[in-house]
Image (spheres, rainbow, N blue to C red):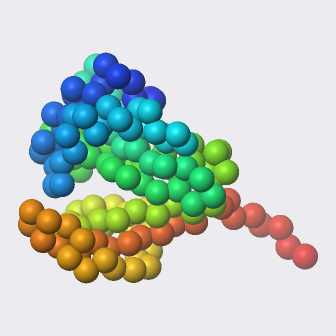
């Protein structure tokens, strides 16, 4: 599976993936992400099939805005590969930390995020609609640890 920058020709495939995810984004919003200043958008591609996508806003603190994987590619490492590559790019752009929000009932995503080193730092009550749910706020340091001793 290859991870590459998303381009305009990927928008229709990404919109299809979104329809199978919770809180799906419309095609117009996905296309607008490609114009975001300080934005990073990636797709995972397997044999010319867009298997998943993610996007973030970079800065000293980056924020994962969206990650979604095609149902047939879930639980196969696609989400982890996308997020790991996204973290690398945000770190390279100068980010020290990554934040994200996830539905409190999304135990599969929570498991992935915690496995990748994210910790719960807050909660936004009744943040999501259709269905109503709390948003858990997670955070991960992107700083490389060093073994320098004094």
Q: Is residue 119 left or right of residue 109?
A: right
Residue at position x 19%, y 40% from top?
A: 26
**Nearer to the camera, 10 or 125:** 125
Q: Is residue 104 visible?
A: no
Say above or below: 54 vs 60.
above
Occupied quadrant, residue 130: bottom left
**Nearer to the camera, 146 or 28:** 28
Where residue 139 appears, x then y in whole percent?
A: 48, 69
Residue at position x 16%, y 55% from top?
A: 22
**Nearer to the camera, 38 or 47:** 38
Where residue 61 appears, x then y in whole percent?
A: 57, 60
Q: Is residue 102 visible?
A: yes
Q: Give the farthest residue toward the left.
A: 131
In what quadrant of the picture does the C terminus appear?
A: bottom right
In what quadrant of the picture does the N terminus appear?
A: top left
Say above or below: 23 vs 48.
below
Where residue 67 appears, x then y in whole percent?
A: 32, 48
Say above or below: 112 vs 66.
below
Q: Is residue 54 left or right of residue 76?
A: right
Q: Is residue 41 left or right of residue 128?
A: right
Residue at position x 38%, y 72% from top?
A: 137
Where residue 30 appears, x then y in whole percent?
A: 30, 37
Occupied quadrant, residue 93: top right
Looking at the rendered structure, the number of numbered marks drawn on it comes to 0
Q: Give the farthest residue toward the right.
A: 150
Q: Is residue 100 left or right of residue 70?
A: right
Residue at position x 55%, y 50% from top?
A: 58
Say above or below: 100 vs 27.
below
């Amino acid at each position: 599976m290859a991870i590459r920058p998303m381009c305009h020709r990927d928008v229709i495939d990404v919109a299809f993936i979104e329809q199978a995810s919770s809180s799906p984004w419309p095609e117009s919003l996905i296309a607008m992400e490609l114009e975001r200043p300080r934005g990073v958008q990636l797709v995972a591609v397997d044999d010319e099939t867009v298997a998943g996508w993610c996007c973030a806003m970079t800065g000293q603190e980056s924020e994962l805005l969206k990650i979604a994987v095609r149902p047939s590619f879930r639980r196969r490492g696609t989400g982890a590969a996308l997020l790991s590559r996204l973290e690398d790019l945000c770190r390279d752009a100068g980010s020290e930390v990554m934040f994200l929000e996830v539905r409190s009932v999304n135990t599969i995503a929570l498991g992935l995020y915690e496995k990748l080193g994210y910790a719960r730092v807050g909660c936004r009550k009744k943040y999501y609609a259709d269905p109503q749910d709390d948003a858990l706020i997670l955070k991960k340091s992107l700083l490389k640890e060093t073994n320098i001793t004094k």
